[in-house]
Image (spheres, rainbow, N blue to C red):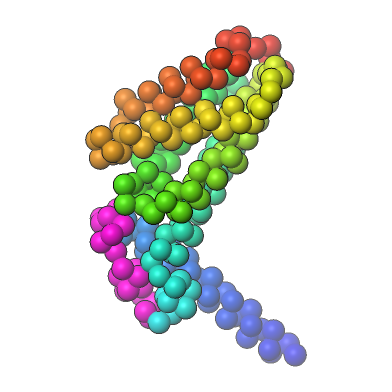
Amino acid sequence: MQPTRSRKSSTQARGRARREALLGAARTLLTERTLAQIELSDVAALAGIPKSSAYYFYGDIHALYAELAALHDEELNDAFAAPMPRLKDWEAVIGLLIDRAADYFFENSSACQLMFGPQTPPDIKWISRSADKTHSAVFEEQIDRQFLMPEFPDRDRVFFRAVEATDLMFGLSILEFGALTERMVEEAKIMACAYLRVYIPPILPRR
């Protein structure tokens, strides 16, 4: 029985490695081309994987993009959840979180295309919209670790909308300028904080 389990483990490891190679190749190609200019066969060729194997893991390029979008959202959430220094107020916490998002997108142009690009299919964009619920919970937690926030109705929804406002400004930057700009990152901070100020006083007691 042991040899059978070993062969199965080896096959699973090889499968994981090939999926990771395909995702990595897609990331690379999306720095050079638009979504519509890439075929699954292009990704397989760059990854050095037989085309038949690529189609075994992903029925089409759309399925690969969906998994890559979900991976980007996981990585982005890890960036949000990383420890923070002690900051002067809750708006500084929001500012740093939005800076972390901007840094991630500056370093991952494939994420920009998949989350904000005009060619991204609606269902893939919905993956990121759904992930924003997780991101917004981290925004709330990061403030709560440093400050005592007041209770107010639908607090989770309020933070979700603040994250959506940030996404809106990032998306407008891609639409208007073809890239995420520093100016639009600052606009995202202004919009998110202005909305949250409706519910959160400017000065909160420290923990």
Question: Is 54 situated left or right of 83 in this image?
Answer: left
Who is closer to the viewer here, 21 or 39?
39
Q: Say which quarter of the image contains residue 199.
A: top right
Magenta residues? Answer: 31-51
Indicate whether 169 appears above or below 92. below
Q: Say which quarter of the image contains residue 191.
A: top left
Does residue 16 show up magenta in the picture? no
Q: Position of residue 59 (x, y in %)?
A: 44, 73
Residue beneath the point at 37% across and 64% down: 25
Q: Position of residue 91 (x, y in %)?
A: 53, 18
Indicate whether 156 appears above or below 112. above
Q: Is residue 76 visible?
A: no
Does residue 42 show up magenta in the picture? yes
Who is closer to the viewer here, 20 or 86?
20
Q: Is residue 45 visible?
A: yes
Indicate whether 72 appears above or below 10. above
Residue beneath the point at 58% across and 29% down: 159
Question: Is 33 situated left or right of 70 in this image?
Answer: left
Q: Position of residue 4 (x, y in %)?
A: 68, 89
